[in-house]
Image: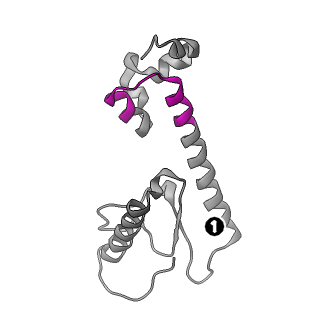
């Protein structure tokens, strides 16, 4: 929502807003579903912001113009991207009989490439049937 009034500099207002958003998401399990914050404040790159929202979750709108069709398209694009990433992650996880903690964290963060030869994701790309047989687990 739009922000109003209130003081605080160096990202203080923005940080309070980000903290409120994170508290809400934590309280309702909202991180399991795609979500986007639409706000007039810069919750991604404001100076002094300790814990910014990721740009994949925020659309900043001009308070003088309100939400434009371009803003709405940006929101829809972010939601679509999150849905695709979630579907891919779920599809890969369903192929794997079991994940050890290292692979689970790497997969969740989208950093499977850092595992190099040990990456189950790379092994599945080479031979998806082997993953179903448990050859790469």
Residue 11, by quadrant, is bottom left
Image position of 23 (left or right of 121): left
Q: Is residue 86 above or below residue 97?
A: below
Q: Quadrant of the C terminus?
A: top left
What is the residue that sits farthest to the bottom in this orientation? 5
Q: Nearer the viewer, residue 111 or 22?
A: 22
* Residue 99 belongs to the span the image colors magenta: yes
Crowd rating for badge 1 (residues with CA inside 10 Å; few <14, some 14–19, many 20+): some
Residue 128, by quadrant, is top right
Q: Is residue 84 above or below residue 69?
A: above
Q: Looking at the picture, how far across and down is residue 91, in whole percent?
A: 57, 31
Q: Looking at the picture, how far across and down is residue 35, in whole percent?
A: 53, 58
Residue that appears at 63% across and 67% down: 71
Q: Looking at the picture, how far across and down is residue 96, in whole percent?
A: 48, 23
Q: Looking at the picture, how far across and down is residue 85, in whole percent?
A: 55, 41
Residue that appears at 63% across and 60% down: 74
* Residue 132 belongs to the span the image colors magenta: no
**Start and end of the magenta stretch?**
88-105
Q: Which residue is mark 1?
A: 71
Q: Is residue 6 above or below residue 40?
A: below
Q: Nearer the viewer, residue 128 or 56?
A: 128
What is the residue that sits farthest to the right in this orientation? 69
Q: Secondary structure at mark 1?
A: helix
Q: Is residue 76 above or below residue 133?
A: below
User: Which is the main secondary structure of the residues drawn in magenta?
Assistant: helix
Residue 53, by quadrant, is bottom left
Image position of 4 (left or right of 16): right
Q: Nearer the viewer, residue 34 or 39?
A: 34
């Amino acid at each position: 929502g739009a922000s109003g009034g209130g003081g605080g500099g160096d990202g203080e207002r923005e940080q309070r807003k980000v903290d409120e958003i994170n508290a809400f998401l934590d309280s309702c399990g909202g991180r399991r579903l795609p979500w986007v914050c639409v706000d007039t404040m810069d919750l991604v790159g404001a100076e002094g912001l300790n814990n910014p929202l990721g740009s994949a979750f925020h659309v900043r709108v001009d308070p003088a113009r309100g939400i434009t069709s371009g803003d709405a398209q940006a929101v829809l694009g972010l939601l679509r991207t999150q849905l695709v990433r979630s579907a891919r992650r779920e599809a890969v996880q369903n192929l794997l009989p079991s994940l050890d903690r290292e692979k689970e964290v790497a997969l969740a963060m989208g950093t499977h490439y850092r595992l190099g030869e040990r990456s189950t994701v790379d092994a599945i790309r080479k031979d998806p049937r082997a993953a179903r047989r448990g050859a790469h687990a």
